[in-house]
Image: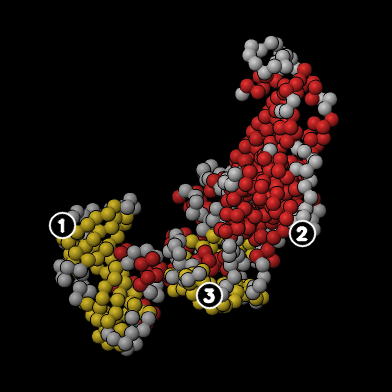
Amino acid sequence: MLLPIFSFNKSQIIAFPLTGFSLQWFETLLYQDTLHEALKNSLIVAISSCTLATILGTLASRSATRYDFKGKQISLTFILAPLILPEIIVGVSLLIVLIQLGLSLNIWSVILGHTLLIMPFSIIIMNSAFNNLDVSLEEASMDLGENRFGTFYRVILPLVFPGIIASLLIGFTLSLDEFIIAFFLTGTDTTLPVYIWSQFRFPKKLPTTMALGTILIFVSLILLSISEYYRRRTYSKDFVLSTEKEPTKPIKINKD
Amino acid sequence: MSNQVQVKDVIKNFDQVRAVDGVSLEIEQGQFFSLLGPSGCGKTTLLRLIAGFEVPNSGDILIDSKSMDGVDPNLRPTNMVFQNYAIFPHLNVEQNVAYGLRKKKLTNSERASMINQALDLVGLSGLNERSSNALSGGQKQRVALARALILKPKVLLLDEPLSALDKKLREQMQSELRHLQKAVGITFILVTHDQEEALTMSDKVAVMFDGKVEQVASPRDLYERPSTQRVASFIGAMNFIECKVLEKGKNLKIRDSVLGSFDLSKEQVSGVSSNNSITIGIRPEMISILPKGSKIKNSISGKVSDISYFGETTYYKIKCDIDSKIFNISAQNSFGHVDYSIGEKIEFKIDLKSIVGFLK
């Protein structure tokens, strides 16, 4: 909580009393090339990993909610494992695997790690979206002449769309703020949190780093709020069953 | 009239449970056909088999003499009205109704006139832009009907479409559906567990128990000539009495301690039997209580043991003087009727022509 306060403080020294309001630390952010590079990397990582995780998560939860197959429970448990494993273990083990495979560490290894990390969140969000989807809606669409693809495109996708948006936003935020996995897997392409960490060595730059942190916190809060809004907007089953009475005109018979 | 839908020896298993057990049916073109039975009798599964949502384990379903084996639901000439209506929540009324028209090559004006005609048919004209979230239960039902009828299916399948509506609206929709069916001339297959609904709406009713069809008949035959005890007691109430068969000739000569001796014609009796016992059934409204003090030939005397009041009718439980046999009698509370109280002695007689016999 103190962090945002000090980022607006005039003095370079992090201590009370505050010496005055200033935006100079935010201003200095604009002139740091390495920071911009890290920001670019972070955005690439965040966008690709949240997209990838959402696509995979959507497919996985669709098959898990709609079909029964052997090993479903086991594979789901494995996919959800990063949720309970400490990130440092996920990071270290991925590092070992990648090195054993002889792959070099670059932006792609971070994307891979983050996708793995975001997938469980995607699956949980999409699971609830698919569970809220009434099977009879799919059947109705098939009954009215649409094939499976048309049904997916015209009924399923629009109805789980809020879930997809929520998953993308949460994934984006998670990836943007994630440090440990990025720290292990990043090569020369540092992401923003890794960059911030490296800046802590320079006391002079501390207020600037804090300003950066402040921005990150607010961006994350905004994204999470939007995603929560979308997550709650998924159509619920209750809609279909709600029946209140209202006088209706009698059916007119057309003789044709 | 030809048989439009033919169901041939269809069997459907769910894991260990046999939901539909060797059902065969013939449904004529333009008929209002009902599948009636208690919950879990397989009637909905049978409907879903016809729609193509379930695949039979054995047997075949033919529509217009074409086998539906391996035909996906989107390619069958059937449309369905779902129990919960399955209105697409993200589309408005017009988009819902027009959902199935996408594959049809239509000009905008043809499309618009088809939609308006369909909405007009179900009494929803002018609600094109209404969001489906803002619809009442009855209106959703109408949208579901319009959405199905606009595609001019050969067979319209209705899965308990009225069960979610309140009593008043349900009765209104029953007669509307009936008129609608006669007007469009499409074969309707209705699944219901409500006997009254099946009797008032259908041309023909198939009664199902435990995955099997027990009787297919017109509503009147079903009520007046049920083929088994189960059908008889599922559709309305019935008094059952074990009797002795004295003689099996052209007519059956029956003897009972209370009813005395009487004949049953072949049409009144169903089933086959090797021994000489028979169960006979008498509807409560086919027994009438005689005015006080009158005693006619073959009248039976007893005492009122219980009374249930239902508004337009009153049900009396009568204990007979002979053998203490119990009869349920319903009496119309019409103009000039007499009320009886518990313990009162009464005389009643039975319409022998209405009696049905079940051999087993």
Q: Nearer the viewer, residue B97 or A94?
A: A94
Looking at the rendered structure, the kind of residue marked 1 is Gly
Residue at the image point whose x is 47% and y is 71% from the top? B16
Q: Distance from label 3 to label 1 (Cα)?
A: 53 Å
Residue B128 x/y as whole percent: 68, 44
| Above or below B15: residue A95 | above
In the rendered structure, the answer to whether residue A147 lies left or right of residue B145 reads right
In the rendered structure, the answer to whether residue B152 lies left or right of residue B107 reads left
Chain at tag 1: B
Residue at the image point whose x is 70% and y is 30% from the top? A216
Mark 1, residue position: B343
- Mark 3 is surrounded, within 10 Å at the Cα level, by few (under 14), some (14 to 19) or many (20 or more) other residues, namely many
| Above or below A250: residue B204 | below
Q: Residue furthest bottom?
A: B249
Q: Do the numbered discs 2 and 1 sit on residues whose CB atoms are within 8 Å?
A: no
Instruction: Specify the quadrant of the image occupied by residue B54.
Output: bottom right
Mark 3, residue position: B11
Residue at the image point whose x is 72% and y is 49% from the top? A112
Residue A158 x/y as whole percent: 69, 47
Mark closest to the chain's N terminus, 3 or 1: 3
Mark closest to the chain's N terminus, 2 or 1: 2
Mark 2, residue position: B104
Q: Nearer the viewer, mark 2 or mark 1?
A: 2
| Above or below B312: residue B279 | below
Q: Distance from label 2 to label 3 (Cα)?
A: 35 Å
